[in-house]
Image (cartoon, rainbow, N blue to C red):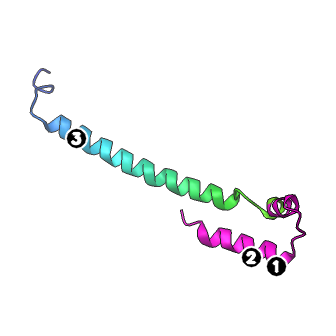
Amino acid sequence: MLIFFAWDGGWFAIAAVALILGLVGGFFGARALLKRELEKNPPINEQMIRAMFMSMGRKPSEAQIRQVMNNMKKNSNL
């Protein structure tokens, strides 16, 4: 039993590799989950764009709203 916990560096290397793999896997998993959630529930929608235009005193056309939405989608590269 005492030999198992002896300082030979083997268990430390396994723990370090497991930690690194966990961090990398967690990062990419969280990134994919966040990307999927943002696609399903975008942070801004057409109603918000209309409200923004109206608050600036402008009546937006559908073409302007689609243009803003397309620009938002094009520039959102997560």
Q: Judging from the image, what secondary structure is the residue with disc 2 in?
A: helix
User: Closer to the observer: label 3 or label 1?
Assistant: 1
Outermost residue to the bottom = 63
Name the residue rendered at 12%, 20% in the picture: 2
Residues at marks 3 and 2, CA–CA distance in whole angstroms: 52 Å
Q: Is the magenta stretch mostly helix, strand or loop?
A: helix
Q: Judging from the image, what secondary structure is the residue with disc 1 in?
A: helix
Q: Is residue 30 above or below residue 53?
A: above
Name the residue that disc number 1 marks.
Answer: 63
Q: Residue 22 at x, y = what percent?
A: 37, 45
Q: Earlier in the sequence, mark 3 or mark 2?
A: 3
Identified by mark 1, the residue type is Ala
Q: Residue 58 at x, y = what percent?
A: 88, 67
Outermost residue to the top = 2
Q: What mark, if any, has residue 14 been given in the picture?
A: 3
User: Closer to the observer: label 3 or label 2?
Assistant: 2
Residues at marks 3 and 1, CA–CA distance in whole angstroms: 58 Å
Identified by mark 3, the residue type is Ile
Name the residue that disc number 2 marks.
Answer: 67
In depth, the one of 78 and 36 nearer the eye is 78
State if disc 2 and disc 1 touch (CB < 8 Å).
Answer: yes
